[in-house]
Image: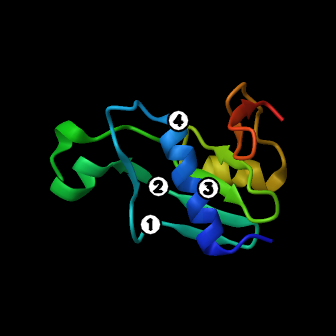
């Protein structure tokens, strides 16, 4: 099982991997949700978090780092956060080509 610190390191790697290299992303402090199966992170551009200026906002959905595997599960923005959590917990989250990201290979997968 991964520690909170190890999951945060994976979260930062994921944000770096998945972002436009011109935009530095940062975890939004105080919004991380701890679940028995992992941590859910919200994030935005560092510039937006520091200034609050909406022109720097990057529309992103939260993501989960699984405590047991380190796999990152991306949640979308088309539906409510509760929809994605409920689907994940029930095992009905629809796989997409970039739903899961693996830190060891730094590749997306639908599995």
Asked whether the residues under the numbered discs 2 and 4 touch, taking CB atoms below 8 Å apart as contact, a structural biologist would say no
Q: Which of the two discs, 2 and 1, labels the residue nearer the N terminus?
A: 1
SS type, badge 2: loop
Q: Is residue 91 left or right of residue 21?
A: right
Q: Residues within 10 Å of mark 2 (few under 14, many from 20)?
A: some
Residue underneath mark 1: 31
Label disc, if present, on residue 42 of the rendered structure: 2
Question: From mark 2 to mark 1, how far is it between C-alphas?
Answer: 6 Å
Q: Nearer the viewer, mark 2 or mark 4?
A: 4
Q: Secondary structure at mark 4?
A: helix
Q: Nearer the viewer, mark 2 or mark 3?
A: 3
Question: On the image, numbered disc 4 is attached to which residue?
Answer: 18
One can see residue 95 in this view = yes
Q: Element under label 3? A: helix
Between 50 and 31, the one lying in front of the other is 50
Of the residues under marks 1 and 3, which one precedes in the sequence? 3
Graded by Cα atoms within 10 Å as few (under 14), some (14 to 19) or many (20 or more), the crowding at tag 1 reads: few
Label 2 to label 4, Cα distance in Å?
Answer: 14 Å
N-term mark: 4 or 3: 3
User: Dividing the image into 4 quarters, which one contains the N terminus?
Assistant: bottom right
Determine the CA span between mark 2 and mark 3. Answer: 14 Å
**What residue sits right under mark 3 in the picture?**
10
Nearest to N terminus: mark 2 or mark 4: 4
Tell me whether the residue at label 4 lies in contact with that at label 1, contact meaning CB atoms closer than 8 angstroms.
no
User: Is tag 2's residue or tag 3's residue first in the polypeptide sequence?
Assistant: 3
């Amino acid at each position: 099982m991964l520690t909170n610190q190890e999951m945060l390191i994976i979260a930062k790697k994921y944000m770096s991997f998945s972002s436009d290299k011109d935009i530095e992303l940062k975890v939004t402090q105080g919004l991380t949700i701890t679940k028995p199966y992992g941590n859910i992170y919200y994030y935005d551009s560092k510039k937006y978090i520091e200034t609050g200026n909406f022109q720097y906002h990057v529309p992103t959905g939260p993501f989960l780092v699984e405590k047991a595997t380190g796999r990152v599960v991306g949640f979308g923005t088309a539906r409510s956060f509760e929809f994605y959590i409920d689907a994940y917990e029930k095992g009905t989250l629809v796989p997409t080509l970039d739903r899961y990201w693996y830190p060891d290979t730094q590749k997306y997968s639908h599995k």
